[in-house]
Amino acid sequence: MAQQPSIPKGTRDFSPLEVQRRHYIMNIIQRHFELYGFMPIETPSFENSDTLMGNYGEEGDRLIFKILNSGEYLEKVDPKLLQTGKENQLTSQISEKALRYDLTVPFARYVVQNQNDITFPFKRYQMQNVWRADRPQKGRFREFTQCDADVVGSNSLLQEVELVQLYDAVFTDLKLHSCTIKINNRKVLAGIAQVMGAEDKLIDFTVALDKLDKIGKKKVQEEMLSKGIEQQAIDILDPVFSLSGSYAEKIASMKELLKNSEIGLKGIEELEFINTSILQVPLKSAILDLDITLARGLNYYTGCIFEVAAPEGVSIGSIGGGGRYDDLTGIFGLKDVSGVGISFGLDRIYLVLEQLELFPNSVRAGVEVLFINFGIKEAQYCSLWLSRFRESGIKTELYPDAAKMKKQLTYADRNAIPYVILAGEDEITKGKLNLKNMASSEQFLLTPEEVISKLS
RNA sequence: GUGAUUGUAGCUCAGUUGGUUAGAGCGCUGGUUUGUGGUGCCGGAAGUCGCGGGUUCGAGUCCCGUCCUUCACCCCA
């Protein structure tokens, strides 16, 4: 017995049913992307390392899969470096390429590279795999699929509004009701840090604040203290910890807190505009909620940020996220192009739909008719009709071997094929086909044309 | 990267205080009037008990290491 084969940690195989269900989700997302005017592009699975590195924060860079150079990659390395064991420097010498970590940064690279051929504002969608060298966990893989829609070249907040509506449209169509679209604004977070006098600790402060609903007020305060934020500053935060009420009420409280911060008030103004616009055309099934604690780790966001939480009772991380990045293309040399986008986490949406049993039965669409194989002569008679059936749009297959009837019928049964056709000597003589309904066991002796019209 | 957890047939798992040839169910395969499946009956194949070391007369069972699984943290879809 050979050793059991296996696949790398955090990767998965997909069975026929799983692939069909994934296509079901992707088709719905794709349809709405296109309804909102987004165009598809694709980019390579791997990029030059310097395209990716430095955009995701320190943690993010650590999770990028690096690709080892080909050939004698060690020859070019400074021997001293090997001995000192400085991994960061060593990595850059033996690896020049890396698997993409998300779709947004490669997209920014694409925009810069193709700027002369692009008419702005440019709206694109992209549904491809990304890779993260994370430790796998529930709903967390090292290879997974993101479905992104981004707009670059427009500062208009109407884009943010449309993206919220797009989220709502997709989740409504998936019958996934009561998702919460959490929204916040980096400017508000910057404003809070300003008011606290902790501008230099912005990242530490937001990372700690982000954990509020998970570990509670006290632990968040402890973490901030340990990061060197003054107790006095943390006290100013108090209204944020106890923020409650409707979207509009939270806006009002935050206005008061941020009254001395220009940037903070700008963020609040944006959030207010989005809410007002959304209220004019109410969302169909999702809930838009202002969550001041929402931070998101990706470095490049500068304005509104989004995160989608699955309906209550489903314990899984966020199923989507996004936000505005004012200068992502700047790092590749194209200034003053603002972008905003959202992402759907296909794999997590799958897990949620599975847990809530929201996949329609019709998703499983296999063969409709199986021709039983009685032997060469009979099979040749059947093959005349096979192509006719297929031309009529009926998914048809002929059992390849003249195996025992029991085996062939078991095959049909296992594959949930609803009809089989028995065409042996008798039927050939009469020029007919015997159509058997697998569920009811009824059989009908019909002409091929009658069978086609019955099944199509 | 930190901390826990798991590993026995293709799958889900039993396996008693360490004691001869390691079990069950499902699945697979063959047969049960060779033109009739889903439930019956009879038979069969399949495991160097994750891997490496150690303790012992003897290890699936105890000890150490390692890898893998799963979970939490970090971070994130």
Image (cartoon, coloured by chain):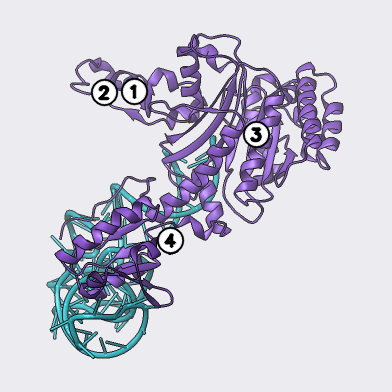
Chain colours: A purple, B cyan
Disc sitting over residue A97 in the figure: 1
Cβ–Cβ under 8 Å for marks 2 and 3: no
- What residue do we see at 70% from left, 22% from top? A198
Residue A328 percent across, percent down from the top left: 55, 18
Label 3 chain ID: A
Q: Quadrant of residue A157?
A: top right
In space, the residues marked 2 and 3 are separated at their CA atoms by 37 Å
CA neighbours of label 3 inside 10 A, class few (<14), some (14 to 19), many (20+)? many
* Closer to viewer: mark 1 or mark 4: 4
Q: Quadrant of the C terminus of chain A?
A: bottom left
- What residue do we see at 49% from left, 50% from top? A138
Q: Are marks 2 and 3 on the same chain?
A: yes
Q: Tell me the element at label 2.
A: loop
Q: Tell me the element at label 1.
A: strand
Label 1 chain ID: A
Query: Disc 3 marks which amino acid?
Result: Phe
Disc sitting over residue A453 in the figure: 4
Residue B69 percent across, percent down from the top left: 38, 53
